[in-house]
Image: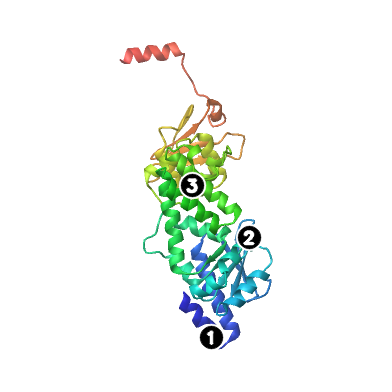
């Protein structure tokens, strides 16, 4: 990627050069966080207008492209940027000693700016030994990263710290967990840091460790479990049953419905979460429908039905020739039952069972 940006900058046609630079970096950011929508503007290296904008629904983050061959000037530019929580993308990777000498990390964090380079982005996007937390890290940096992350080694170290930190939290190890929390506080703005802290806390509690021994500021909010699970379902890359069993021990049908409302039930992680915690999920009613006339799915797959009518939502299990609806109360199935057919008195039914036996 670094060479592609350099080649684009040396194109003799200024307009073509600008187009190629933006296209190269837009492709890199799209791979860095595929969940973002990227809009390229008509500006280039502008003082206050962004070169492109990353957005996630109503949430936006402006992206400024900056030349990095003059590091003191880059530092001055960082000081002058408006407080828009921007992402500053350097067009080359400056020497580490220049970054330290000009205090780019401290100045970026003070201005709530995330400064990165082609080298760091490429390292995090294509690490040879990818970790389960890599995609979560990239999304978090795109959303709310701050400070300077310019070199490959620093980027790799950040990825490893988050990965091993979650492993430490699952095992109740204080030192590794504390290091991960300190790293999160350094590299992320307040909102994103709070979200990642809740994830670490959920893994800590899921591993069976006591909350009063958590080496950070514990969030005691009642919805911490759902908020953390949404992020884990969306961005954690693991099918390890022990991990999903750990973070889902307090799972309920109502929580699964809340996950569906947050659009977090469509991927394989939702299947891992439910399958790992079937022994703790409590339900009071189940309706099974004959689906032999419908196309049969491959295997069994969990889902959540959020009807638009007055019917209550339900956890669903679709399998060959059937679909089951599971609710936390009998009343939750009201509206899903068809008109009752001909029945028989209970005494007659019991008598028939005795006769058959």
Which element carries disc 2, helix, strand or loop?
Answer: strand
Disc 1 target residue: 11
Disc 2 target residue: 60
Q: How many marks?
A: 3
Question: Residue extending furthest left?
Answer: 357
Quarter holding residue 161 = bottom left
The alpha-carbon separation of the residues under discs 1 and 2 comes to 31 Å
Q: Is residue 274 above or below residue 157?
A: above
Q: Which image quadrant: the C terminus?
A: top left
Q: Earlier in the sequence, mark 1 or mark 2?
A: 1
Q: Residue at x 42, y 65 (%)?
A: 126
- Residue 268 visible to an observer of this rendering: no
Disc 3 target residue: 200
Q: Is residue 314 above or below residue 262?
A: above
Q: Earlier in the sequence, mark 1 or mark 3?
A: 1
- Residue 12 visible to an observer of this rendering: yes
- Give percent across and percent down for residue 184: 52, 54
């Amino acid at each position: 990627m670094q060479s592609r940006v350099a080649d684009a900058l040396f194109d003799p046609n200024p307009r073509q050069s600008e187009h190629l630079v933006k296209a190269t970096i837009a492709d890199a950011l799209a791979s860095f966080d595929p969940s973002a929508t990227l809009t390229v503007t008509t500006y280039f290296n502008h003082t206050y207008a962004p070169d492109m904008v990353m957005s996630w629904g109503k949430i936006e983050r402006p992206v400024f492209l900056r030349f990095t061959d003059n590091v003191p000037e880059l530092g001055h530019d960082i000081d002058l940027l408006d407080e828009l929580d921007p992402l500053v993308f350097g067009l080359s990777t400056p020497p580490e000693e220049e970054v330290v000498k000009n205090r780019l990390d401290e100045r970026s964090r003070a201005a709530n700016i995330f400064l990165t380079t082609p080298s760091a982005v490429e390292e995090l996007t294509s690490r040879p030994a990818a970790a389960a937390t890599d995609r979560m890290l990239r999304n978090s940096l795109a959303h709310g990263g701050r400070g300077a992350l310019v070199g490959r080694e620093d980027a790799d170290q950040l990825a490893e710290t988050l990965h091993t930190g979650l492993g430490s939290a699952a095992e109740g190890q204080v030192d590794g967990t504390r290091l991960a929390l300190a790293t999160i506080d350094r590299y992320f703005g307040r909102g994103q840091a709070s979200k990642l802290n809740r994830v670490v806390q959920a893994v800590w509690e899921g591993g069976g460790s006591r909350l009063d021994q958590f080496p950070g500021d514990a969030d005691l909010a009642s919805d911490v479990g759902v908020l953390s699970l949404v992020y884990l379902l969306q961005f954690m890359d693991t099918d390890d049953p022990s991990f999903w069993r750990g973070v889902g021990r307090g799972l309920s049908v109502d929580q699964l419905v809340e996950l569906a409302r947050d659009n977090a039930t469509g991927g394989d992680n939702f299947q891992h979460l439910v399958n790992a915690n079937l022994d703790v999920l409590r339900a009071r009613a189940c309706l099974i429908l004959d689906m032999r006339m419908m196309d049969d799915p491959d295997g069994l797959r969990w889902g959540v039905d959020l009807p638009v009518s007055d019917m209550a939502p339900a956890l669903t299990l679709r399998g060959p020739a059937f679909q089951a609806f599971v609710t936390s109360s009998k009343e939750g199935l009201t509206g899903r039952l068809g008109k009752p057919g001909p029945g028989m008195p209970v005494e007659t039914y019991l008598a028939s069972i005795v006769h058959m036996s």
